[in-house]
Amino acid sequence: MEQRFCYKDQRINIGDILMFIVMFMLNIGLFFASLVMGLKGELDYVAKLTILVLVIIFNGPIIAYFILKLSTMIKFKRKINRFKADGKKFRAKIIDEKLGKPLMESEIQTIYTYYPVVKFFDSETQKEITLTSNYPMCASYEKALSLNSVTIYVMDEDFLIFDFAEIGDKEYSLERRTSNGRAIADVTEKIYKIKQIAYEVGMLISCLILLGIQVLKYFLIG
């Protein structure tokens, strides 16, 4: 899953997409359950009511989540417009970032959010200023950007980032600009691929074991 350099509340992100996938899979499961019960002639009033209740239980929280997400995106869009209208514009450099809460967690990989740290020179005060963002980004700037130079709008020691150089190919990222960074990135990718293969093999073995148990039970009962 490609990580985009955007604010968590700015648009739909990987975590939101996973929520949608969960919602889709639950509904598919309920649909097939009702279809099988209908073919068997077991879909009576009680069964229909049970399925309806399950649909509400499964979909209610997820629908509420997406309504809240839409509201958050609208509020953040207004914040962006306010910063552009009333904030002071500077050219800055991202010099560091602070690790935030996970955006997505799984057995294979955990994707975190990041709070960029920027440095810029204020000609009015004749001082170099360093600020840490109050809003989490969906990706590390070292992985997602080819340059650390950005445009920021500042209001009351708060800022938003604009006009950044997002990569089209990970080979041009800041992380891979140095031989040391490239080596670390390559090792990380290899570890991720090994974990992914191990997880998929483990799932396959588990499925085969469960299938074997079911076959053995069938012959023993027969």
Image: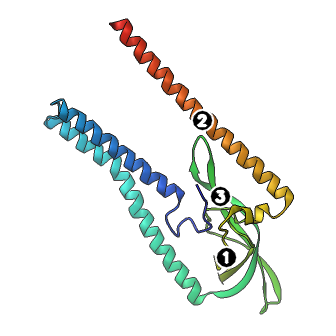
Q: Which residue is label 3 attached to?
A: 100
Q: Which residue is label 2 attached to?
A: 199
Q: Are marks 2 and 3 in contact (CB under 8 Å)?
A: no
Q: Which residue is label 1 attached to?
A: 164
Q: Which image quarter holds the C terminus?
A: top left
Tag 2's secondary structure?
helix
Q: Are marks 3 and 1 in contact (CB under 8 Å)?
A: no
Give the CA separation, mark 2 to mark 3: 26 Å
Q: Nearer the viewer, residue 153 or 127?
A: 153
Residue 70 figure quarter: bottom left
At horizontal 58% and vertical 30% (from top left) the residue drawn is: 202
Residue 46 figure quarter: top left
At label 1, counting other C-alpha atoms closer than 10 Å, the crowd grade (few under 14, some 14-19, many 20 or more) is some
Q: Position of residue 73 (x, y in %)?
A: 47, 70
Q: Nearer the viewer, mark 2 or mark 3?
A: 2
At label 2, counting other C-alpha atoms closer than 10 Å, the crowd grade (few under 14, some 14-19, many 20 or more) is some
At label 3, counting other C-alpha atoms closer than 10 Å, the crowd grade (few under 14, some 14-19, many 20 or more) is some
Task: Report how many numbered discs are placed on residues in the image.
Answer: 3
Q: Is residue 190 above or below residue 71?
A: above
Q: Is residue 32 above or below residue 93?
A: above
Q: Position of residue 138 (x, y in %)?
A: 60, 62
- Kind of residue at badge 2: Tyr
Give the CA separation, mark 3 to mark 1: 21 Å
- Kind of residue at badge 3: Gly
Q: Position of residue 27 (x, y in %)?
A: 33, 46
Q: Nearer the viewer, residue 206 or 112?
A: 206
